[in-house]
Image (cartoon, rainbow, N blue to C red):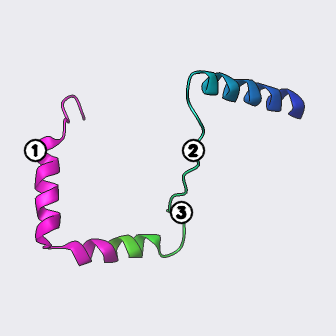
């Protein structure tokens, strides 16, 4: 069974490579980790009232295409 799964994965990856794609590994923060939410809050509070942050958020609101979003 394992060999069958490994072969299917190998074939799938080969087809993706043949289509011009390549695998990329991305490491992201673990949102389940203790203290994650506290650190998010801390960083958000640091940016509160920051003029550059306000400017970027204003630009994003104007530039975002949210048509059809619920």
Please tell me whether mark 1 sits on a helix, a strand or a loop: helix
Question: Are there few (<14), some (14-19), or many (20+) residues within 10 Å of tag 1?
Answer: few
Compared to residue 30, the image places residue 43 above or below, namely below
In the depicted view, which residue is nearer to us: 15 or 40?
Answer: 15
Mark nearer the N terminus (1 vs 3):
3
Q: Which residue is mark 3?
A: 30
Mark nearer the N terminus (2 vs 1):
2
Q: Quadrant of residue 70?
A: top left
Q: Is residue 69 left or right of residue 54?
A: right
Q: What x and y, as percent, mark residue 65?
A: 19, 35
Question: Are there few (<14), some (14-19), or many (20+) residues within 10 Å of tag 3?
Answer: few
The numbered mark at residue 62 is 1
Of the 4 image quadrants, the one containing the N terminus is: top right
Q: What x and y, as percent, mark residue 37?
A: 41, 70
Mark nearer the N terminus (3 vs 2):
2
Residue 10 falls inside the magenta stretch: no
Residue drawn at x 51%, y 58% is 28
Q: Is residue 5 left or right of residue 12?
A: right
Please tell me whether mark 3 sits on a helix, a strand or a loop: loop
Residue 54 falls inside the magenta stretch: yes
Q: Which residue is mark 2?
A: 24
Residue drawn at x 88%, y 31% is 3
C-alpha span from label 2 to label 1: 32 Å
C-alpha span from label 3 to label 2: 18 Å
State which region is magenta. Answer: 42-70
Q: Is residue 1 visible?
A: no
């Amino acid at each position: 069974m394992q060999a069958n799964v490994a072969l299917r994965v190998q074939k799938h990856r080969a087809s993706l490579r043949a289509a011009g794609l390549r695998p990329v590994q991305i490491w992201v923060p673990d949102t389940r980790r203790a203290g994650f939410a506290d650190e998010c809050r801390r960083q958000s509070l640091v940016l509160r009232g920051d003029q550059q942050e306000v400017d970027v958020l204003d630009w994003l609101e104007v530039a975002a295409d949210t048509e059809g979003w619920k």
